[in-house]
Image (spheres, rainbow, N blue to C red):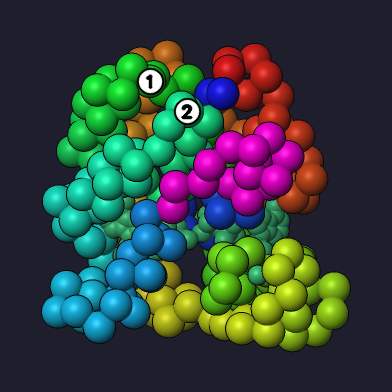
Amino acid sequence: MPNVILLGPPGAGKGTQAKRLEDERGMVQLSTGDMLRAARTSGTEMGRRVAEVMDRGELVTDDIVIGLIGERLSASQGGGFIFDGFPRTLKQADALAALLDRMGQRLDAVIEMQVDDAVLVARITGRYICGSCGAVYHDTTRPTRVAGVCDACGSTDLRRRADDTEEALKQRLLEYYKKTSPLIGYYYAKGLLTTVDGLADMDAVGAAVAAVLDRRG
Ligand code: ADP
Ligand code: ADP
Ligand code: ZN
């Protein structure tokens, strides 16, 4: 199965499409955001520091996230990875190339989910997630079928993210443009980049992502 990076600003729809690919194709989502959210509840000193950085909307240090991805990859077999929210810096991109190389895997596609920044506030402030399985919902564009109950796993642990405020989003967008958006040019130059319209409805975005994988995978 192909290995793909989903690239885009906070709220672009990366997590939503990653979950779809897991359900529809049995691919494996590797979300550094989810891994870091798990680490922050661990009660360790590292977890406490990570929580502070995340809630300010800044990027966690490269070494920490590269370590997390490295652990996950070395524990897995085969491919079919969906990198969601990783890499976010050129250093992380280089580290990923080295890790995949060591596993005899390659990167098949990088999908940029292009959105208008003006929609991101509404996307982010309406988002809620399942604390149990990580499914992603939205107050208006994708509410759970039964209020308060996760469609995917039945959990009632639905929550908002501490960093999903308008204030933290400003910082997250700045970080995206300063540190992550250079990856668009970087992967374009490698011949791996395809851009999809992230403003379309979720099914249409899903179809566009599927078409890229069928072409490149
Ligand atoms: P979003 O849904 O906004 O794209 P994520 O869940 O991917 O957010 O990430 C949430 C936060 O976790 C980021 O703002 C950042 O603090 C931290 N984080 C996640 N992935 C990375 C990464 N690859 N490098 C650095 N920090 C990261
Ligand atoms: P990211 O992982 O890139 O931060 P998410 O997948 O978590 O983005 O999506 C952000 C919010 O926008 C969520 O509440 C999600 O339900 C909603 N959303 C995702 N894709 C779309 C879409 N195509 N149209 C409308 N809302 C969307
Ligand atoms: Zn759930």
Q: Is residue 184 above or below residue 69?
A: above
Residue at image point 78% right, 41% down:
204
Residue at image point 56% right, 23% down:
1
Q: Which of the two residues, 216 or 189, is positioned nearer the viewer here? A: 216
Q: Secondary structure at mark 1?
A: loop
Q: Amino acid at mark 1?
A: Gln
Name the quadrant where ligand 1 sits. Answer: bottom left
Mark yes or no: residue 192 visible: yes
Q: Quadrant of residue 189?
A: top left
Q: Position of residue 26 (x, y in %)?
A: 64, 38
Q: Which residue is mark 2?
A: 79
Q: Earlier along the polypeptide chain: callout 2 or callout 1?
A: 2
Q: Position of residue 39 (x, y in %)?
A: 30, 70
Is 27 included in the stretch rendered in magenta? Answer: yes
| Viewport quadrant of the C terminus | top right
Q: Which residue is mark 1?
A: 105
Q: Which of the two residues, 128 or 80, is positioned nearer the viewer here? A: 80
